[in-house]
Amino acid sequence: MKKKFRALFRSYLTLVFSPVRQGIRNTFLKWLFPGMGIKRWVVLSAIGVILTIFGASRLGAARFFTEKLTLGKTTDTLIIALGIYLIFRGVKELFVFIIRLFLPQKDKGEGKGLVDIIYEKKYLTHGPKITAVGGGTGLSTLLHGLKEYTNNISAIVTVADDGGSSGRIRQQFGILPPGDIRNCLVALAEAEPMMRDLFQFRFEEGSELEGHSFGNLFITAMTRLTGDFEKAVKESSKILAIRGQVIPSTLNRVSLAANYKDGTHEEGEAQIPKKGVPIRNVFLKPSDVRATPEAVKAILEAEIIILGPGSLYTSIIPNLLIKEIKDALVASSALKVYVCNIMTQRGETDNYSAFDHLNAVITHSKARIVDYCIMNTAPIPADLLEKYKEEESFAIKNDSERIRRAGFKVIEDDMAELGDLVRHDSKKLAKMIIALAEQK
């Protein structure tokens, strides 16, 4: 009988107090629930306040009693010091706890100090406004270094790619090529390394997905889901928690074509370098494509604009062929920098010197879009030169005096990262660009 009565009584209490408990769960008292990880720091701070007040009151009272021993005063001072330390520790940990709730997953790991969190969320937010224009691996290398100095990065990326996975997706689904966009998103990503590796994962041979990267397929699916390529890029940016923004140069479907010096013609970004004939000029089809408003805005608001590094005719110049982007570059008051490649590219820049690279940029746009030219001076090891020679690629001739005589400023320094391949050192390049921005 007693057991039944107890069971009924418990059921009654549950029925009566469940709304109250639910109300508590929807109020500030949620902070006091077990496992929240916040009560300990509140209690620690409260103990610190109590000790500080207690020690201060004893120390103050000692002024009225001349017989108070020096040892007692020392003890009171230590109590106050301990109280202040506990307050500081509790408030600091509480502050870090709350901040980490709003950080990307990567930042929630161990070893992230308060100063690092403040630096990333406060200092980088006030970094220089940098707009980088280009595409391919060259642009992603640059972005990887810049994101350590500022969150205010805008990457304007060409969408003329029609080769590889991007070309297949472009042809099959009728969307803009996602490959260069994906590389830039990953370069600016602050998400977990696993997420970055996932976006760069490429399916191997032996399947229908052979050659496709997961990131390309993800952006494609997001485009079909949202109905808009630009929205798909923005949603992908959120998933990767990127620093800055990646902007397609245009949302129009466009193809790149080239006129060669022998009078012939070729269409298709992937086909242009294969002919092996010197290029006279490149152009877009159709020629009247519109720039994305965000790209124009990023250029006009920038403090420093970077062109390159990257494939001259197929990554950098296609962006400059869009009239609104070219006009914005001319009108911008930002410092404009061209980063010259280190090695020539077969089928595009055979036998080109540094001046030839810069001159091609100017010829396809206007002289006023460049103020500085950055060039590498690091010698390339003989074994690497031999390796590149087999691919008909050579170190670019340094004719900086010719560039200076043409009215441009030149910065020469060791910019190379020498491994299995010759690439720009992203850290050195970013450091130099930030120094230029600070001078301006």
Image (cartoon, rainbow, N blue to C red):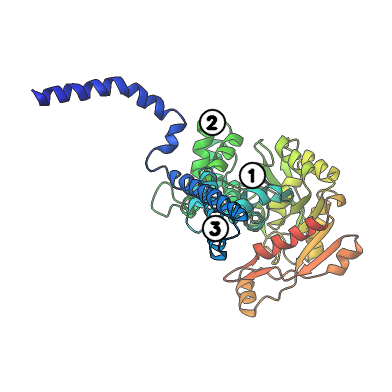
The disc, 1 or 3, on the residue closer to the chain's N-terminal end is 3
Number of dots carrying numbers: 3
- Front position among marks 1 and 3: 3
Up-down: is 141 above or below 159?
below
Q: Which residue is mark 1?
A: 246
Q: Residue at x 83, y 44 (%)?
A: 332
- Front position among marks 2 and 3: 3
Give x and y (percent) for residue 277.
71, 59
Q: Residue extending furthest bottom?
A: 382
Q: Residue at x 62, y 56 (%)?
A: 144
* Amino acid beneath label 1: Val
The C terminus appears in which quarter of the rendering? bottom right
Q: Which residue is mark 3?
A: 76
The disc, 2 or 3, on the residue closer to the chain's N-terminal end is 3
Give x and y (percent) for residue 62.
59, 55
Rounded to the nearest whole Å, what is the CA distance between mark 2 and mark 3?
A: 66 Å
When asked about the image quadrant of residue 350, the answer is: bottom right
The N terminus appears in which quarter of the rendering? top left
On the picture, is 364 further left or further right than 198? right
Dot 1: element: strand
Q: Which mark is residue 226?
A: 2
When asked about the image quadrant of residue 276, the answer is: bottom right
Seen from the viewer's position, the closer of residues 182 and 40 is 40
* Amino acid beneath label 3: Asp
